[in-house]
Amino acid sequence: MDAIASKKVVFILNVLAAMAALTAAGLWFWSTRVEVEYVDPSPVDGWIPGSITFDNRNGKRVDPFATGIEQARRNRWAALAASAAAFCQGFAAILS
């Protein structure tokens, strides 16, 4: 590969790395904003299962466990974008 083509590939990889890093940042911010609304559990054999909730600033009841699960799911997408950014940047560093 000649020098000009190599520089073009490095430039493209750096642009892809920047886009993936911005995507990861957005996804991580998005994951901090999620709140799963609490749903009353249905009785089992006449017993109502115990649960934990908290009220957010707006007075909405939030299920902290379901919220944590949803945040973890969104964090996986952010980590995938961050790993793509690292891969592109590392490969660009090797080529330059």
Image: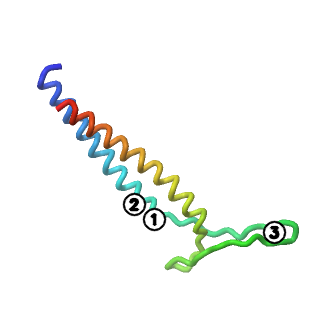
The residue under the point 42% across, 50% down is 78
Residue on which the image places disc 2: 29
Quadrant for residue 83, please give it.
top left
Location of mark 3 (residue): 43
- At label 2, the amino acid type is Phe
- Sequence order check, earlier mark of 2 and 3: 2
Distance (Cα) linking label 2 and label 1: 7 Å
Q: Residue drawn at (29%, 37%), measured in percent from left and top?
A: 88
- Residue 7: x %, y % from top left: 15, 30
Task: Measuring from the top left, give residue 90's x and y in whole percent.
Answer: 27, 38
Q: Amino acid at mark 3?
A: Pro
- According to the picture, the residue beneath numbered tag 1 turns out to be 33
In which quadrant is the N terminus drawn?
top left
From the image, which quarter does the C terminus lie in?
top left
- What is the x, y in percent for residue 18? 27, 46
Query: What residue appears at the point 83 percent right and 72 percent down from the top-left corner?
Result: 47
Is 68 situated left or right of 52 in this image?
Answer: left
State the SS at label 3. loop
Q: Amino acid at mark 1?
A: Arg
Are dots 2 and 1 in contact, CB under 8 Å?
yes
Q: Relative to the observer, which residue lies in front, 95 or 34?
A: 95
Compute the Cα span from label 2 to label 3.
36 Å
As drawn, is 28 to the left or to the right of 5?
right
Residue at image point 81% right, 69% down: 43
